[in-house]
Amino acid sequence: MPETRHLFATPFVIDTLQSEEGLRMLRDAIEAEHARDADGVSISNIGGWHSNTQMLDWGGEAARALALKAMQLADAQTLDVRSPDDSRFTWHPEMWANVSGKGNANQYHFHPGSYWSAVAYVDDGYDGDENPELGGELQLLDPRMPMVRMTAPDLRMRGEGGDAQQNEVLVRPRTGMIVMFPSWLQHAVRAFLGQGTRISIAINLIPVLKRG
């Protein structure tokens, strides 16, 4: 009887931001920056507003607290194998905000040069509506599958339970959610069709050696 093993799991971390005041402060800072720089930048976003990546400079105390939260999540999920009891590394964070309205989306991309990436949702934009047809889900793509499926798009490898492995996972955001995943993991955002405004913050964590 052959033995089947499933290798190379991909970590995906979900947590909740507890401070309503912190979320309010983040919203205020993003709205102020949006008013100051209405054009923003265009990177992976399809419509909507994408700020510059200097949110640590203009986002105030709440942005610094969010960056610290992401760094703590990363510390808990990362091991320095040469110094397991006292990591020689810390994190350099980059942050930016996204504001999305009806029909806006983000195309598939990843974040080269970073180790961990995170997304925090200041407002999911659903206004309490649980209708799945509103879209706006975070899409996570198994980076191994597109190449494999080119020659046989209807084939799937079996998972541990015998069913087809998932090669694309959807995560429905909620206000206050923060998620973290490896920066090499391809991700996108499906078209958001809610009546509200989606406000989110993206964070890249770049490993750097501690001074001294």
Image (cartoon, rainbow, N blue to C red):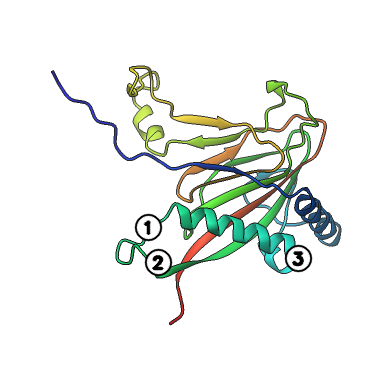
N-terminal of the two: label 1 or label 2? Answer: 1
What element does badge 3 sit on? helix
* Visible residue check, residue 152: yes
Q: Nearer the viewer, residue 74 or 18?
A: 18
Q: Residue furthest bottom?
A: 212
Q: Residue at x 47, y 60 (%)?
A: 113
Tell me where residue 168 appears, x and y as whole percent.
48, 30
How far separated are the C-alphas under marks 1 and 2? 7 Å
Residue 60 badge? 3
Q: Is residue 12 above or below residue 117?
A: above
Image marks 1 and 2: residues in contact by CB distance under 8 Å: yes
Q: Nearer the viewer, residue 19 or 134?
A: 19
Name the quarter where the N terminus is drawn. Answer: top left
Q: Nearer the viewer, residue 128 or 95?
A: 128
Mark 2, residue position: 87
Q: Residue at x 63, y 52 (%)?
A: 202
Residue 138 left/right relative to 98: left
Tell me where residue 116 appears, x and y as whole percent.
49, 54
**Pointer 1: residues within 10 angstroms few (<14), some, or many (20+)?**
some
| Quadrant of the image occupied by residue 53 | bottom right
Amino acid type at mark 2: Ser
N-terminal of the two: label 3 or label 1? Answer: 3
Mark 1, residue position: 79
**Pointer 3: residues within 10 angstroms few (<14), some, or many (20+)?**
few
Amino acid type at mark 3: Gly
Amino acid type at mark 1: Leu
How far separated are the C-alphas under marks 2 and 3? 28 Å
Q: Is residue 83 above or below residue 114?
A: below
